[in-house]
Image: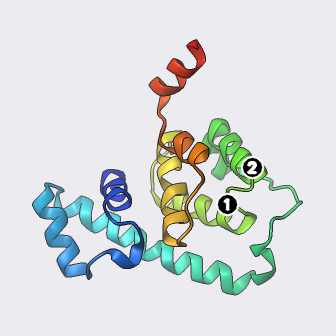
Amino acid sequence: MFDVLVYLYETYYRPEACPDSEALVKKLSAVGFEAEEISKALGWLTDLAQATNEYSRSYPQQTAFSFGMRFYAPQEMDVLGTETVGFLQFLESAKVIDSLQREIIIERALAAADPQVSLDKIKVIVLMVLWSQGKEPDALIFDELFSDEEDAEARQLH
């Protein structure tokens, strides 16, 4: 599923640029993605749009950056892990995401149904949330979101 999401992010500048569902399924199949992965990814994106609308409607005052503190439930910590929570706190303190986007990211991570969501998958989720809202991170944050563990090790050696 995450490979399909990355492909969509890299191929279509904005969600509106995506073709309709039927044409998109054909294009993704032609590229080589399996039907099950395509279905999961498109369902996940549909649910992302619904979650975004629901959170925005339910918490309109939360669209500004919050100075409150977020406490994570044990079940959230089990799925996210401390590294991911730290990364989300970094993004929020750097004003890349706001508290509402953080909640959407957490909800979408839990919806991935993985026993533990890796930091690389969280980075994809962050990109997809921003992409779906028509927002693009600045170049430094973009590099951080697309870096992997090997890139991080190379940066630390210099």
Say if 39 sits above or below 77 in the image: below
Say if 146 sits above or below 21 in the image: above
Residue 47 as seen in the image, left or right of residue 41: right
Specify which label sits upstream in the sequence, 1 or 2.
2
Q: Residue at x 48, y 61 (%)?
A: 128
Residue 44 as seen in the image, left or right of residue 58: left
Residue at the extreme right = 67
- In the image, 59 versus 137, the foreground residue is 137
Which amino acid does the dot numbered 1 rest on?
Answer: Arg
Which amino acid does the dot numbered 2 rest on?
Answer: Ala
Residue 141 as seen in the image, left or right of residue 47: right
Q: Which residue is mark 2?
A: 94
Q: Which residue is mark 1?
A: 102
- In the image, 72 versus 98, the foreground residue is 98
Q: How is the image coloured?
A: rainbow
Residue 150 image position (x, y, % from top left): 45, 24
